Every structure is written in structure tokens, then in C-alpha cells.
Amino acid sequence: MSVMQGSDRRFVTVSEMAEMCRLSRSRFYDLMDAGVFPKPALHSSSKRPIFDRAMIEKCLEIRLTGIGANGLPVLFNRKSVKRPQAKPSRKPAEEPQPDHGDLLDSLKGLGLTTTAHAVDEAVAALYPSALAGHDQGDVIRKVFLHLQGTRGGERQ
């Protein structure tokens, strides 16, 4: 149901009527109490306040023309639209770290006790651009040797 257009429904609630008039529900109630908008009828079985088709059209006409049901002019403010605001981050955005879980498992299978952080640092030092395109066996060997303190099979 678009704002400020009639509804195909025969009855609407006060909240729906306020939304159709682009007003908050509390402001709509204030204007009803002041006689600007007509008071709703009570539904026969539920005693809930509702607007019928004629009342819907009258309320939309009042909103459009600015002349209340009491015959006095009324000015409407726009209903504020709440937009989600991006929260400022305290840290600069970091790129997500790639998961080296398989590599860590392979190194542990070779008997090396290490942490995921140490593996991430070794991979970053040995492969600054990325692991893509490198043989996985070669990657495991080089990272293993790097973490053991050797480079390319030579002792330091």
C-alpha cells in the first residue's frame, strides 16, 4: 500500500491510517483529539478502532489539502525517515585472513607443534602475493622448514 494513496481494503487500523498519511501514530492521535482528523469507528465484535472506506478518503483528503475536519487549516511536518547509519570503525578495515587449517593439519601430521598464527605469519613471509598456483606439497615443505628455522634446506 503506497503512502498518500487510497487502499483497496475496506477498513484500516489507526496505525495503518497514520502511515498512509505519513504521520507518526502519536501525532495522528493528537490531531484526532484536536478535531483535524475524524475519530475512528469501533469494530462491532472486537471494539478495535478502525477507519472505513469513506473515513480513509476523508483523512487522505485532509492530508492533501491541509484543511482539517474541523474546517481549520493545518500544517504537517514530514515524517522523518530513519536511515541506518554506518558505525564508524575504530580500527582500519583489515582484509580477512585466509584459512590455513589444512596446512596447519598437515604440519601437525609431520610432528610440528605450532599455532595458526605462526602458520599465517610464515605463509605471509614466504608467499606475500598468495598461495594460488603453488604446489601444496612444496608449500607444506617450505612452511615446515621456515618454522623449523631453516630456509631451503640450509641451516642458519
Image: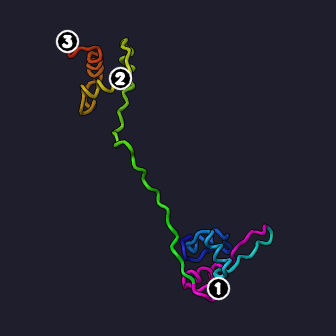
Q: Earlier in the sequence, mark 1 or mark 3?
A: 1
Residue linked to disc 1: 69
Mark toward the viewer: 2 or 1: 1
**Quarter of the C terminus within the rendering:** top left
Position of 17 with respect to 87 (left or right) is: right
Q: Which residues are magenta?
A: 46-73
Q: Nearer the viewer, residue 18 or 7?
A: 18
Distance from Cα at disc 2 to Cα at disc 1? 75 Å
Position of 145 with respect to 67 (left or right) is: left
The crowding category of the residue bearing disc 1, from other C-alpha atoms within 10 Å (few below 14, some 14 to 19, many at least 20), is: some
Q: Earlier in the sequence, mark 2 or mark 3?
A: 2
Residue linked to disc 3: 156
Colouring mode (rainbow / by chain / secondary structure / one colour):
rainbow
Instruction: Determine the residue positioned at 38% across, 24% down.
Output: 116
Q: Where is residue 26 shown, x and y percent of the image?
A: 63, 69
Q: Where is residue 15 shown, x and y percent of the image?
A: 64, 68
Q: Nearer the viewer, residue 110 or 28?
A: 28
Relative vertical location of residue 84 with respect to residue 62 in this rendering, above or below: above
